[in-house]
Amino acid sequence: MRILLVGEYSRFHNSLKEGLVALGHDVVIIGDNDFKNYPLDISVYAKTFKKGCFLNKIRQGIFRLFKIDVAQIEIAFRFYANRKKLTGFDVVQLVNEYPLQSNVVLEKKILQYLFKNNKKIFLSSCGDDYVSVKHMLEDKFRYSVLTPCKENPNLGHCQYTLRYVTKPFEELHKYVYENISAVIPADLDYAIPLENHPKAVPLIPYPINVDKNEYSPLLIDNKVIIFHGINEANYYKKGNAFFEKALEVIEKKYADKVEIITTRSIPYATYIELYNKANILLDQAYSYDQGYNALEAMAKGKVVFTGAEKEFTAHYNLNERVCVNALADVDYLVKELSGLIDNPEEIMAIGKRARTFIEKEHDYKIIANRYLETWGNN
């Protein structure tokens, strides 16, 4: 089977490709890369106007004058330069309703071309989109990534997230849903808003390459190593302010017992190299389920502070912790971190259960097969 995966922002599609290729399928990934620099077969990255180069200043000037982002036009140009390579696929899966991040008008043209020249089209729900953002705005979640925006609407991610419910994006959403065979949620943060939706199929968890992400039993010598990797663009969206304040307390309280590593917006390969030595990883505080970074760390046996709400434990029928449910509460985070630092045997126990959980629920070959079944049945 020939499969085209459109968009890549978390290594989700790369891991899915690895599983599909292992099962004998031909897979191509096209995407617009960001600073994480994930592998792509076809890149539409707007490198002419990338940050740091002279032409980026011209781009910014044009945007200030005309509200036109020429980098988004370049993405569309690069797509059309590669368009002949993007036809005749048995299955196309979009990582999002807005997978390549051109402007909305050009994105619709891009999608129209893909819909017209390929067979089945599927949509993954694994990031901000019309349905999930609308669900947040209707206060159907106890908390969400928009919770910080209630106190400060000017936070960087607020308008970025809220654009998905503006009229142009709502129209793009409707157009995508008219042309897809089904939408596949990848975790509970997106499955919950899609409950009872006529186009939604059951959740398929993120695929994790358990062969590449090897498990190493946690060894705690003199100090517990805590890793906090920050993506500046998502600083408040992930609850990083709460993690940083909690770490300040922990550093004073356990000066001789902990080593804290903090990074900011670094490439994926560097990020992995630094967090490999950690025992505990701080991921995000406003989610109900785990995202990609959390799952890869769990596969390696790390204790991850991330989404692990009651909906998650119920869905997977868990009786013991495989990660720590993180909340936007400094005192709570300090208490949870302190409990682990004071009881390093619990760190090792959770890390071991985390690996077992990933092998059971997220193995990339098993998950790839579930996608094949879903694509075949819809």
Image: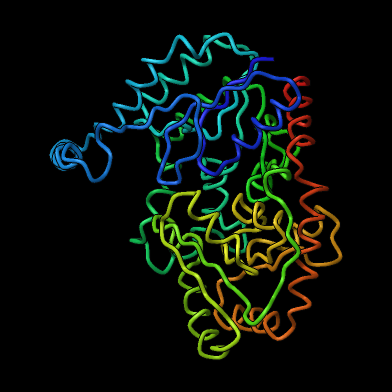
Number of numbered tags placed on the structure image: 0
Which residue is nearer to you in this view: 219 or 152?
219
Q: Is residue 70 left or right of residue 307?
A: left
x and y percentages locating residue 278 in the rendered image: 61, 67
Which residue is nearer to you in this view: 50 or 72?
50
x and y percentages locating residue 113 in the rendered image: 46, 14
Image point (50%, 41%), residue name: 9
Q: Residue furthest front?
A: 221
Up the image or down, 124 lies above or below 21; here it is below
Which quadrant would the C terminus be assigned to in this image? top right
Image point (46%, 61%), residue name: 230
Q: Is residue 86 left or right of residue 215?
A: left
Image point (58%, 66%), residue name: 282
x and y percentages locating residue 257 in the rendered image: 60, 85
Residue 73 lies in what quarter of the image? Answer: top left
Q: Residue furthest bottom?
A: 253
x and y percentages locating residue 47 in the rendered image: 30, 33
Q: Is residue 93 left or right of residue 310?
A: left
Image point (69%, 68%), residue name: 324
Residue 51 lies in what quarter of the image? Answer: top left
Which quadrant would the N terminus be assigned to in this image? top right
Which residue is nearer to you in this view: 227 or 76?
227
Colouring convention used in this rendered image of the protein: rainbow
Q: Is residue 187 left or right of residue 127?
A: right
